[in-house]
Amino acid sequence: MNRAARLIPGALSLLCLLAGPARADEAADLRALLEARAPAIVTVKAVVKAEIRMMGQAQDEEQRLELQGAVIDPSGLVVLSSSAFSAARMQEMLENMGAPEGIEIDLTPVSLEVVTADGTQLKAFLAATDARLDLSFLQVEGLGERQLAAIDLAGEAPEVEVGQQVAQVTRLGEGYDFAPVFEVGRVSGQIKKPRRAWSADGLSGLGLPVFTTGGQVVGVLGTVSAPSSGEGGELGGLMRMMSGGGAGGGMRPFIYPARVVKAIVEQARTRAAELLEERAKNPPAEAPAPEGSQQQGEGQQQGGEGQQQQGGGQQQQQGGGGR
Amino acid sequence: MKRTPILALPLLLALLAAPVAAQSAASDALRRDIEYAKARVYPALVNISVVVRQYSGGRAVRGPAVGSGVIVSPAGHVLTNFHVAGNTTRITCSLPSGESIEADVLCHDPLTDLSVLLLRMNTRRDPTIPLPFAALGSSAALQVGEYVLAMGNPQALSSSLTLGVVCNTARVFTDFTGSSIEDLDLGGGELTGLFTRWIQHDALILGGNSGGPLVNLRGEVVGINELGGSGMGFAIPSDLAASVLNQVLTFGEVRRGFLGASILPVTKIHRDEGALVASVLPGSPAEQAGLRAGDVILTLDGRPVDARFFEEVPLFYQRIAELAPGRIVRLGIERGPELDRLELRATLSRMERSIGTEVEFPAAGLTVQDITGPMALARQLPSTEGVLVTGLRPGKPFEAARPDIQSGDVILGLGSHAIADAEGLGRALEALASQDDVLLTYRRGEQRLLTLVDLKKVDPPRSGGLLPKAWLGVRTQVLTADLAQALGLAGTRGFRVTEVFPGTRAAAAGLRAGDVITSVDGEALEASRPQDAQELRLAIEDLLVGDTAELGVVRDGTPAKLEVELQESPASARDVKSAQEERFEFAVRELTFMDRVERRWPQGQRGLLVVEATMGGQANVAGLRIDDLLLSINGQPVATAADFERIMAEIKERKPKVVQLFVRRGHRTHFVFLEPDWDSQPGAR
């Protein structure tokens, strides 16, 4: 915008309409953003098991999903939206649609693979989930000495302002060889209740970082669940959903500022490191065995891991007290 | 079935003396006949409850199903439909006397939709009681208009009986245009009905009557009910059932000769005799004998062949089927516009099932079918070598292979093993278990494709649970302006405590329901409207676990300060220990703090929460439900996953006849009785 500033302020707006230097700068900025940040944006290939429980019976089914995540630590910590693993939203929607009482849904990731920018596929596990921000954290395994390109959410982040232009980097699907693309949007408003966040128009990368067009991290895109206004039966819920006021506005994206996410990232990083250590000590069973007894082994394995998990939790508490 | 209503009898009596007398005598006779027939068959009627396997999405899902059957020999042979007993993992027969006996399959015959079972006579509680059985009568002797009784379990209501008449003794099903016999599909391409001329009757039958007997007034089984609906019922004739039963008793299987020609009635070509050959299957004995479509078969082994109507078509197929495989038959045919007479000799082959058995390989995430001759023909495969892929389970080795494998592909080789059938595939998978990058050869249409499959078994990673947050341990409601006014606290903003969870630091600090929290660490709360509901929780979560929070509180109108140490949010379901029970197929987990709070159980409530009870598994079939709280097993209380594993291990050593689970379900308690089949494989699929 430098050259434009030298001209008469009144003509500024006119110039903005022409394909002038301002536009060229913006395009260059976005290109730079894409190039700089794309390496840390990864595709997560997940197989998620959906279990529907009703009247004491359960039916489950697995499905393959392609999700988008961002590497936030070179050791392989990846953040993504937990909506694919969290049945809460789905249940909310079902309840609003008047589903009979007592239907419960449970989503569990069964297998997770992170596809990095250069196409390498790495195994990962779900390390932690933050129920408040609806963000899940995966830890990549088997990196060895290798470090991944990462986006630092802990650094200094500029404040979010209404009207500001913001951008995200996401990737297209496997069919397009995961080509990175950017999305540009605007901060269209702010909410203070139920929590502070900024409404982002035009962005769709849930769980992914949000940047200024200049390339600085301002926060992460997420959803904010608002209490819906009332009861009413099937029709009421449907009417609320269709008039846009229902389902708690659950799917509208909001920007969580970086400082809010920072604390969670720290917790997740610690938890991921703990689990990584545990798994190094108890590697998952790979030994061949006839079908029947293999499953027996699985059950015992889970029992062992559970015990250690319990210990881990207590450590956390003591650590907290010290602080 | 119309019977003279009892109410109208006195009226009719007044008008018509003699005819009425005859009618009431007829009713009495009918009632006696029904009693007689019932006494001869009803005690041998069985309610068959099964666990049936359905293949879908690359897995076998099991579930309960119900049908009927009839005991036809003192040794305990039971006749029922294949669509009741086929693809099952467990069959239990219950008699009207209340006795319940498990049964095994002797032989399935999908081509007639019949199955022959054998009761496990040595497991009877009192073997000295003679087993009731029914006699098979002659279905050929049935007359249209004759009374028949249908016995069975409609809608799973056990042991019912309905009365009707025979509407048709030789029903076949043709397509909409009436120009060909319609193939009856039992599901997945399993064709049936080729030899069947159904007995159509109007004794009401509903779902659940399948496999049950159709009985004449002489108390003989004249049919096995197979189809029904809209007030009509269709039964497989007992003569056909008898021939199947005899073959099974003699050979242990059903052996049928196969020619490979399909025929049409000769009416359209203006003939009175013979059968028109509509199709000759490639590679079949008919083709090899030189038979051609268009030929008219006049004699079979010297005896005339007649197919004037569709009702006579199954009779032709039956004649061929009754001959043994390998037998040479002489076909007298007429060919061409010149009506040349020829005699052809065909060597019958063995008739095969239309589709092969479906098998699941759980670790590989694959369901496959053996390829039969008819399948190979239908799919234009060069041979019956290989197995047909019918489903792939997402995330498992075969579905994860790239280039991908699809349903409909035929697996030909795995690693160095050539795969001829499902059994061969099972052996190859076992031999190659835990190897990665195993080469798979498979066919898709005309293509021969290759891919790599990773057979290393990897346990699904145990996910980390929710991140712990600083937690107060209370439930609250926003103190709205109106509420504040009503409580005499006008102008006060904040949260009214509605519940203090027992055993928490908040409880220990003296926080009570009714207290109004107005500030946290000196910062006043602003909440006064419903949308402010999250404010308190967010304020607490901003603090750290272990911090001491100073709460500004208003109690009974008086402001006060309360110091509460913030504890960690309670462990979620994913964080506690769980235990899997393989044989009975259910899983439990330990209770969390919130489990007890949400269900309003005392904090001392012990037990394990049932989190899985696999459909069709022994626990599920016995009635165990998810969310039941398991209190004790065979009288021994359980509280931890370790307790559970220890007790179940003991039980598997001792092998008791019954395992008694005592559970809490809602506000009631309940007993679930597992009756293990110790002989079968654990978690038998």
Image (cartoon, rainbow, N blue to C red):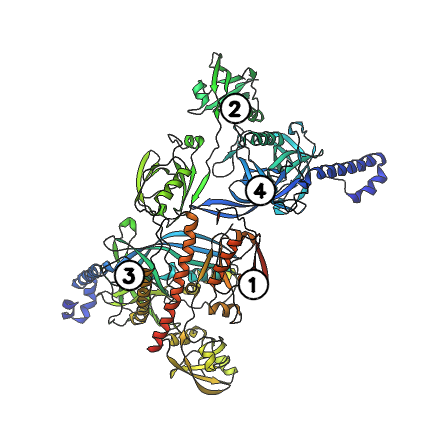
Q: Nearer the viewer, mark 2 or mark 4?
A: 4
* Amino acid type for the residue under numbered disc 1: Arg
Question: Is residue B470 something that shows in the picture?
Answer: yes
Circle 1 residue? B664
Q: Nearer the viewer, residue B669 or B158?
A: B669
Q: CB atoms at circles 1 and 4 under 8 Å apart?
A: no
Decide if residue B525 is on the left or right side of residue B488. left
Q: Which residue is mark 2?
A: B324
Query: Which numbered disc, 4 or 3, marks the residue closer to the eye?
Result: 4
Q: Are marks 1 and 2 on the same chain?
A: yes
Is disc 3 placed on a helix, strand or loop? Answer: strand
Q: Amino acid at mark 3?
A: Ala
Q: Which mark is residue B103?
A: 4
Residue count near mark 1 (Cα–Cα under 10 Å), binned few <14, some 14–19, many ≥20:
some
Q: Say whether mark 4 and mark 2 are on the same chain.
A: yes
Q: Which residue is mark 3?
A: A70
Residue at the image point whose x is 18% and y is 68% from the top: A11
Host chain of mark 4 = B
Secondary structure at badge 1 equals: strand
Marks 3 and 1, how far apart at CA: 45 Å
Q: CA distance from mark 2 to mark 4?
A: 30 Å
Sequence-wise first label, 2 or 4: 4
Chain of the residue on which disc 1 is drawn: B
Query: How many numbered marks are there?
Result: 4
**What is the quadrant of residue B70 in the picture?**
top right
